Amino acid sequence: MSVRAFLLALLLLLPLQAFAQGFAGIGTEADGFARPERGTAFDFPADHGAHPDFRIEWWYVTANMIGPDGTPYGLQWTLFRSALAPGEAPGWSSPQVWFAHAAVTTPDTHLATERFARGGIGQAGVEPAPFRAWIDEWEMAGPDFDTMRLRAAGPDFAYDVSLNAQGPLVFHGDRGYSVKSAQGQASYYYSQPFFALDGTLTLPEGDVAVTGQAWLDREWSSQPLSEDQTGWDWFSLSFDDGDKLMGFRLRQRDGSFFTSGTWIAADGTTTAMGDGEIEAEPLETARVEGRDVPVRWRLRVPARDVEVEVAAINEQAWMGLAISYWEGPVTVRGSHDGIGYLEMTGYE
């Protein structure tokens, strides 16, 4: 969701002790792997599929939903590909490792689970046309990238929803080349933020029919961050007037920040926002699984006359998985009202 989950995707590439010191491992060299290049044209539908010459990649869905009684819900579905070496090979010789996260958030509970798979044996993968991304029985699939069915299940929840695009793909940064640091690390990054959603959540108390909107992020790279970046705060916001905002703040060891974002008009036209054009300030923290995590923010985009407060629907939306982070639905109030999603990493 974005500078989406680089740390998570590197879990199976780097020694775990590298992360004990924060996020330093994300900035390590990626010798032998392909690197993003500015000006590269996207090739669809092929680019909806996997890029095994790059070290890390994901298909990342978040959704804001409403039940029949007006209760707000959040949903996450993420498939990660992580390469031990560039390229592909058949069977167990494949250097590609896959893992996935699924979650449902309510105002009172946060339910999350994960899956792991090895490439080359059919347990997980992505096919661009017809589109299908899967790991075990979890699946996002349809005739194309605009019309899909999304399914996942855990020990205490499940969901089965349809996604139907109501607008175009959008490309972040310079036509999809998204810079992540002052040193120039970058990824390829595009989104489909215009999905209409309907379907069913299965919760411990029973099934809930839901409708809402979903946002899908696609990103791949090999060395996305610099070694002095320790975590990030990523926002995807949908305003009531139809405009949208993707923005992230990468935290530096010296206390400074690198920021980037995209203003997405209701018709899908975009304006890139470089370092310093988005201001994100934590206003309130909550104690979450033994750490202090910002759960209310002031977000400003002066060039767009945006000044809003972004607040968690459930402050305890902690993804307590193999690598832990915070991710959940938010409300937006101020110059622009709306809803969205927030992801935060590196809060230990």
Image (cartoon, grey):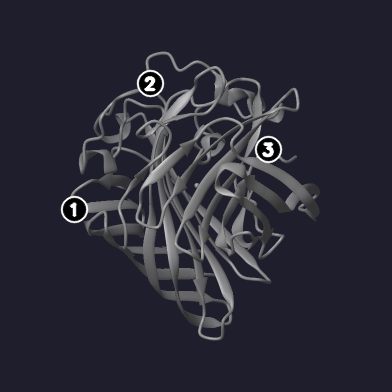
- Which of the pair 124/243 is nearer the observer? 243
Q: Nearer the viewer, residue 30 or 192?
A: 192
The image shows residue 66 at horizontal and vertical percentages of: 52, 75
- Mark 3, secondary structure of its residue: loop
Number of residues whose C-alpha sits closer than 10 Å to that of mark 1, classed few (under 14), some (14–19) or many (20 or more): few
* Quadrant of image for the C terminus: top right
Task: Compute the Cα span from label 3 to label 1.
Answer: 37 Å
Checking the image for residue 121, the label placed there is none
Q: Of marks 3 and 2, which one's residue comes earlier in the chain?
A: 2
* Amino acid type, label 3: Gly
- Image quadrant where residue 33 sits: top left
Mark 3 closeness class: few <14, some 14–19, many ≥20 residues within 10 Å: some
Label 2 – label 1 distance at C-alpha: 27 Å
Mark 2 highlights which residue? 35
- Seen at 31% across and 58% down, the residue is 167
SS at mark 1 in the image: loop
Residue type at tag 1: Pro
Q: Which residue is mark 1?
A: 130
The residue where tag 3 is placed is 346
